Image (cartoon, rainbow, N blue to C red):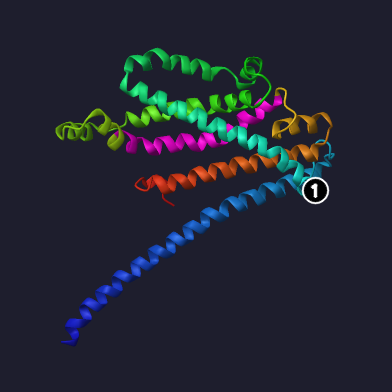
């Protein structure tokens, strides 16, 4: 009798061991993903520091990391005061550009003639350098918030349009056939099949747009703006204040990374069935 009971107990303990090993491996992988970027950043800082020390680079050309960190600390209030307008412009441009891209992608999927007529125009607009677009938008929209938001929206628009069209069209033939067998309407096919299928493609574009929206806002501020990260970069450059210049660039980069991570977190919460976003 005891020998009969020992068999399932051994089997249970044998099943628990692989599970614990798998959990430990997953934990190690998570820590590895967190620590490797920190180690890479630390290595780059050491290389930066060493190059300045070895070649005796003057501070107005390239300041040492400790000088940039000290400037960031001392002028933190000024940096934050200029970051908020840039963050607002980037966020508004992100929402505007991606909303327009999703809406137009929906039209393209349901109206192929519209895609054939207007998709080349979208490619043409995307091919124009944003530095050349910025003065035109300033002339058309004035010198306020509108041109900066528009530039950020234009930068976000095209990647999201391409990925959303691809995602909406990536529905399998068998899935479409099943929906037709179930007598699903076009609306039901779109919201219950096309949209869930397109979400991984959409969030891939949104992660890119989260970074490029900040770039667009900064470029817009270069053309006639008194506040913002872009305006502060111009002022620091003209004043040969390289420490402030590097600190300002660092401030904008940190915001872009934070924006990227927020979109990544939302993706993990929404696209729970896609293996590519699980970590």
User: What stretch of residues is rendered in magenta?
Assistant: 194-222
Q: Residue at x 48, y 61 (%)?
A: 28
Q: Quadrant of the N terminus?
A: bottom left
Q: Is residue 221 magenta?
A: yes
Most common SS among magenta residues: helix
Q: Is residue 37 above or below residue 217?
A: below
Q: Position of residue 135 (x, y in %)?
A: 66, 17
Circle 1 residue: 74
**Which residue lies at the image location 84% right of the left edge and 31% below the top edge?**
239
Asked whether, in this view, residue 155 is left or right of residue 62, the answer is left
Give the residue drawn at x 28%, y 32%.
171
Do we see residue 212 in this rendering?
A: no
Q: Quadrant of residue 220?
A: top right
* Image side of residue 177 versus residue 92, left or right: left
Residue at the far bottom in the pictured view:
2
**Is residue 140 placed above or below 82 in the rendered structure?**
above
Disc 1 on helix, strand or loop?
helix
Residue 47 appears anywhere in the view: yes
The foreground one among 213 and 201 is 213
Q: Position of residue 235 (x, y in %)?
A: 79, 31
Q: How many marks?
A: 1
Question: Residue at (52%, 17%) from the top-left corner?
Answer: 125
Residue 87, position in %: x, y? 62, 37
Q: Residues within 10 Å of mark 1 (few under 14, many from 20)?
A: few
Picture layout, residue 241 above or below residue 33 = above
x and y, in percent, of residue 209 in the image: 52, 33
The question of residue 41 being in magenta is answered with: no
């Amino acid at each position: 009798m005891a020998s009969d009971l020992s068999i399932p107990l051994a089997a249970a303990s044998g099943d628990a061991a692989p599970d614990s090993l798998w959990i430990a491996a997953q934990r190690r992988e998570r820590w590895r993903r967190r620590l490797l970027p920190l180690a890479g950043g630390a290595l780059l800082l050491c290389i930066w520091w060493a190059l300045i020390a070895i070649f005796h680079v003057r501070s107005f050309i390239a300041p040492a990391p400790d000088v940039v960190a000290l400037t960031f600390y001392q002028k933190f209030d000024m940096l934050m005061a200029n970051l908020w307008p840039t963050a607002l412009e980037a966020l508004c441009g992100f929402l505007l550009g991606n909303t327009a891209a999703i809406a137009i992608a929906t039209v393209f999927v349901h109206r192929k003639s519209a895609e054939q007529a207007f998709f080349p125009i979208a490619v043409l607009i995307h091919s124009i350098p944003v530095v050349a677009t910025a003065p035109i938008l300033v002339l058309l929209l004035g010198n306020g918030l509108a041109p900066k938001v528009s530039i950020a929206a234009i930068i976000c628009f095209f990647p999201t349009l391409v990925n959303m069209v691809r995602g909406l069209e990536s529905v399998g033939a068998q899935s479409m056939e099943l929906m037709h067998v179930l007598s699903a309407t076009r609306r039901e096919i779109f919201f219950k099949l096309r949209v869930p299928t397109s979400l991984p493609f959409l969030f891939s574009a949104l992660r890119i747009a989260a970074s490029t929206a900040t770039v667009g806002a900064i470029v817009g501020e270069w053309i006639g703006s008194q506040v913002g990260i872009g305006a502060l970069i111009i002022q620091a450059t003209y004043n040969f204040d390289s420490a402030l210049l590097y600190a300002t660039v660092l401030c904008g980069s940190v915001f872009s990374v934070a924006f990227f991570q927020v979109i990544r977190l939302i993706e993990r919460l929404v696209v729970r069935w896609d293996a590519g976003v699980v970590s």
